[in-house]
Amino acid sequence: MALSDLMTRLDVPERTLNRWLAKLVEAGQVQATGQKRGRRYQLPQQVPTILPSSANHPLFSDFTLQCINRVRQPLITRDPCTYNTAWFDAYQPNQTFYLPAGQRQLLMQQGRQVSAELPAGTYAQRIFNRLLIDLSYNSSRLEGNTYSLPDTEKLLLEGVAADNKLDAERIMLLNHKEAIRFLVEGINRLEITTDNIRSIHYLLADGLVAPGAAGHIRSDAVRISSTTYIPMDNQERLARQMGLITAKAQAITDPFEQSFFLLVHIAYLQAFIDVNKRTSRLACNIPLVRHNLVPLSFNDIDKDDYASAVIVTYEQNDVIPLAELYVSSYLRSCKLYSATAEALGIDPLRVQYRQARRDMIRDIVQQCLHGDLLNAYIQAQVEKCVPECHREKFTSDLHTDLANLAPFSIAGMGISLRDLEAWQRGRM
């Protein structure tokens, strides 16, 4: 229903009705599509914490299938459109939400697999090889890359290229490797800025676009196949709009909403001559890696479904189809990386208190503490630095490390070999 239809049925001021609708949309109890006079409100197909689905498609709701069917019609039947600044301007961080509250809660519940108190990027670093392979493979696959998953693993981990494959496909995967490494290893300094988005694009596009184009806002016009969408032109305008996108993204507090906002708007702007969607897929992982959430590797997304969902955002400014893919793929990623973390035997508490444990080991060795002096020191420090619920585990880890101290394990602790030998002699 349109707002005007609702006004005829409800005896309330328009301002009040708008406020009610905004709250219902944020809570996921009502879905809104379109802009201005074309804006329509409807009840969701299902409770928002459950993925909508259709009998005709395992991931998409009936509403999404209708949207996608429209963008799969012949181009001549669809109206040309260009960048809609009003749609972008209408988004207000922490007031507007592309992902309903129920979905965001579900994603947080499934995506939080380690302590939020761990240093940024800890989780991604522990599953780095799996993330590297999956995200490189799936992001490249969505662009038509024909490398198989085993061949991708061989290329990225062993440097062995597959036979009978195009050089561009190999470069695309190797570029993903560099961009993902940049993302994970630099997460503590990687703010959502235009410069960092350009850096990600440079790493992804180097060798795949004309010399001098990688990382640079384009000065030429671009056209996108299979859509009537005509992106914004003019390098100065594009640079200014990219700055507005990153500034708005920085203001979003929910990591999933922030992630999805980047996925939508970096691709929509088309600020680079090519490799825009790949850049959006890497950039949308910045908030997830920073908050130690499961990264999004775009598993199990059909290439044509993804392309159609993106085109719906271009032509209809409707994010629901892409949101359904985002949520379903993310939940799939959670299951995958949960199994990976379990197989790797990740010990989050050990990682969380690593620095405190090493500081205590340094003091114990340098002060040559043993017996009662050692026990008193440990008790005092543990009570001061470690919450009661974690003390037993911390103390056990500390004693294990002390029992296994060796020259190779004191690197970076500030302990000299002479200190270690003196402390070890005192134990005899």
Image (tube, grey):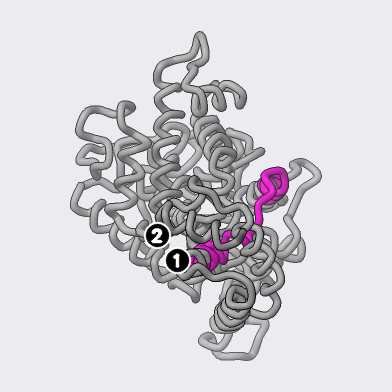
Q: Nearer the viewer, residue 327 or 398?
A: 398
Q: Residue 366 carries which label?
A: 1
Where residue 428 sits in the image (x, y, percent)? 62, 58
**Most extreme residue toward the top, as rendered?**
164
Tag 1 and tag 2, C-beta contact below 8 Å:
yes
What is the quadrant of residue 110 in the picture? Answer: bottom right
Image quadrant in which you'd find residue 153: top right
Front one among 335 and 81:
335
Q: How crowded is mark 2: few (under 14 residues within 10 Å), some or many (20 or more)?
A: some
- Amino acid type, mark 2: Gly
Whether residue 352 is in magenta: the answer is yes
Q: Residue at x 75, y 60 (%)?
A: 50
Q: Distance between the residues labelled 1 and 2?
A: 9 Å
Q: Where is residue 384 in the image (x, y as percent from the top left)?
A: 56, 83
Query: Please, which residue is most extreme toward the bottom here?
Result: 12
In the image, which residues are magenta?
334-360
User: Compared with residue 78, is residue 361 higher up or lower down, i.e. above or below?
Assistant: below
